Structure formats: structure tokens, C-alpha cells
Image (cartoon, rainbow, N blue to C red):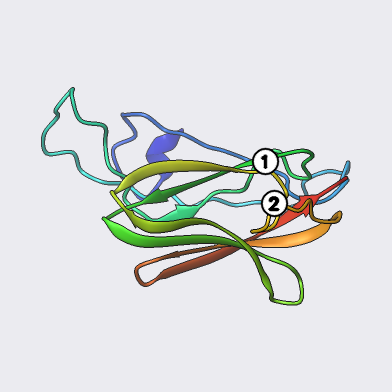
């Protein structure tokens, strides 16, 4: 019963995505939660996709990965974007995106290679998104 959520109108489209990003975890989900962001639509234009309300970096898929993974993110406003991969020592190994981008959803693929095209070793890496004042990092696991 969606009407229990803060007495807001339950009509409309609801999307719930649940992801398990723990490495080789075949157990049960013991605890989870989610946050709803509701916006009032004042007009519709069938030719324009809805813009995201928030900027965020989604979990990559697949994770762990070999030979490549897909990294998706969304921007709520036009932003100068840098999406980079770091090793666990904090060294930048690859910049995947470094340019101004419009608001909306964006996707990039990473092939597990560094800036010189060399295949990186198996291990844990950090994907870091910087967009305007927004910053977010996610763990990525490469298996060779």
C-alpha cells in the first residue's frame, strides 16, 4: 500500500532497483532501505525525456567484471564532468570522461585498461565521479 508513504499520492510510476555489490556474497539480504524522491509534474512534452532530479553514480554492471564493465551516471544539471578510475593507492589509472555534459543519463564502458592501454591486474579499483560540486565514488572489482 503506497499511500502509507508520507500521505503522498501513490499514483504514477514507481521504480525500485535492488543491487548486491558484495564480492562473491551468496547470503541473504539482512537489511536494506530506500529513499523516495517525489516531484510534481507541471507539464508534459512527449518529445523531451524527463531530466533526473539528482546527480548520482550508479553501481557498475557487471561487478566483478571481465573483460569490461558498464558505468552509468545521471546529471541533474549541465556539469563539467570527470569520471576516473583509481587504484587502492589513490593513483589515477584512467580518465574515462573529462568534458562538459548536458543533464540526463550517461553511460561509459571501461575495459580494465589504464591510460596507456595496458591491461590492469585483478583487484579492487575505485570509480570516482566529479560533476560540478557533486562527488561520488564506487568500488569496482576487476577479475582476470
**Secondary structure beneath disc 1?**
strand
User: Which corner quadrant holds the C terminus?
Assistant: top right
Side of 71 where 6 appears, left or right:
left
Residue at 66% in and 42% down? 19
For label 1, the residue is 69
**134 left or right of 139 in image:** left
Point 38% across, 38% down: residue = 3
Q: Is 15 drawn above or below residue 23 in the view shown?
A: above
Residue lying farthest to the left in this orientation: 43
Q: Of callouts 1 and 2, which one flags the residue occurring earlier in the amino acid sequence?
A: 1
Q: Is 67 above or below relative to 140?
A: above
Report x, y in % for residue 139: 70, 59
Q: Percent from the top left, x then y, of residue 119?
A: 79, 51
Q: Which residue is mark 2?
A: 117
* 47, above or below 112, in the image: above
Between 98 and 19, the one nearer to me in the picture: 98
Secondary element type, mark 2: loop
Image quarter for residue 28? top right
Position of residue 40 measured from the top left corner of the image (x, y, whole percent):
20, 43
Question: On screen, 106 above or below 93?
Answer: above
Q: Quadrant of residue 20?
A: top right
Identify the residue at the far front of this view: 116
The Cα atoms of the two marked residues, 1 and 2, are separated by 16 Å
Amino acid at each position: 500500500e503506497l499511500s502509507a508513504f508520507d500521505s503522498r499520492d501513490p499514483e504514477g510510476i514507481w521504480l525500485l532497483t535492488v543491487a548486491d555489490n558484495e564480492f562473491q556474497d551468496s547470503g541473504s539480504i539482512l537489511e536494506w532501505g530506500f529513499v523516495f524522491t517525489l516531484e510534481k509534474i507541471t507539464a508534459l512534452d512527449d518529445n523531451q525525456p524527463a531530466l533526473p532530479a539528482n546527480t548520482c553514480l550508479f553501481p557498475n554492471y557487471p561487478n566483478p567484471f571481465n573483460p569490461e564493465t558498464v558505468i552509468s551516471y545521471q546529471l541533474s544539471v549541465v556539469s563539467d564532468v570527470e569520471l576516473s578510475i583509481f587504484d587502492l593507492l589513490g593513483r589515477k589509472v584512467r580518465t574515462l570522461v573529462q568534458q562538459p555534459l548536458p543533464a540526463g543519463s550517461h553511460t561509459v564502458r571501461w575495459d580494465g585498461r589504464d591510460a596507456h592501454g595496458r591491461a590492469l591486474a585483478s583487484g579492487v579499483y575505485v570509480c570516482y565521479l566529479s560533476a560540478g560540486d557533486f562527488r561520488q565514488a564506487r568500488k569496482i572489482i576487476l577479475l582476470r
